[in-house]
């Protein structure tokens, strides 16, 4: 089974088009990067398509869905789902399918962060921790 986007190479696969995924896409658009969005909510996928984005409705933890996104020819994957277990499984699957892909993901828990590293993630962000640090930094600026 081949990609649903033949000829697409060097693109970014964005898994999850929620708040974090949408911000990732906004930046990719600014940078002029090619990307494919995967989300398991058909309405969300339709909205992404209406915005002119390449998008797939499916489960990003499945090999078939990642293959449909052209993962074998992608340069990077941004895993932005709000579910640590799914993110971990997606990292494992992506790394298995493309040994050279750069994998950036999110985590909500320190334990999962360690597992993501073991699974092959190259970059991990913890949104709650990052937001907390920013808030405290601003609190001390005004104190």
Image: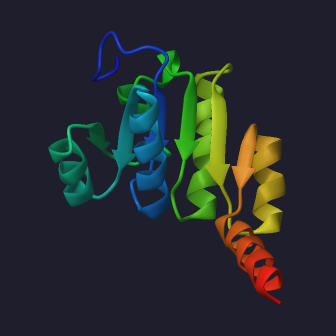
**In the depicted view, which residue is nearer to us: 129 or 14?**
129
Q: Quadrant of the N terminus?
A: top left
Q: Position of residue 51 (x, y in %)?
A: 20, 45
Give the residue displayed 57% in from the left and 44% down from the top: 90
Q: Which of the 4 quarters of the picture holds residue 9?
A: top left
Q: Position of residue 117 (x, y in %)?
A: 81, 45
**For residue 94, side relative to residue 45 (left or right):** right
Give the residue displayed 20% in from the left and 37% down from the top: 52
Q: Position of residue 46 (x, y in %)?
A: 18, 50
Residue 62 in sight from this viewpoint = no
Q: In the orientation shown, which residue stands out farthest toward the front?
A: 142
**For residue 54, side relative to residue 119 (left or right):** left
Q: In the orientation shown, which residue stands out farthest toward the bottom?
A: 143
Residue 59 in sight from this viewpoint = yes
Give the residue displayed 46% in from the left and 23% down from the top: 11
Give the residue displayed 34% in from the left and 17% down from the top: 2
For the image, the number of numbered tags is 0
**In the depicted view, which residue is nearer to us: 124 or 131?**
131
Q: Quadrant of the C terminus?
A: bottom right
**For residue 16, side relative to residue 142 (left or right):** left
Q: Which of the 4 quarters of the picture holds residue 92?
A: top right
**For residue 117, side relative to residue 19 (left or right):** right
Q: Position of residue 14 (x, y in %)?
A: 46, 41
């Amino acid at each position: 089974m081949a990609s649903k986007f033949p000829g697409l190479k060097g693109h970014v696969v964005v898994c999850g088009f929620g708040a974090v995924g949408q911000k990732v896409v906004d930046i990719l658009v600014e940078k002029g990067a090619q990307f494919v969005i995967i989300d398991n909510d058909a309405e969300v996928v339709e909205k992404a398509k209406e915005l002119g984005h390449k998008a797939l409705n499916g489960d990003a933890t499945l090999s078939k869905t990642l293959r449909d996104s052209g993962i074998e020819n992608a340069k990077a994957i941004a895993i932005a789902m709000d579910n640590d277990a799914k993110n971990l499984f997606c990292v494992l699957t992506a790394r298995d399918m493309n040994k050279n892909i750069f994998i950036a993901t999110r985590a909500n828990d320190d334990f999962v962060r360690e597992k993501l590293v073991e699974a092959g993630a190259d970059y991990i962000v913890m949104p709650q921790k990052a937001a907390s640090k920013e808030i405290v930094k601003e609190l001390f600026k005004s104190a």
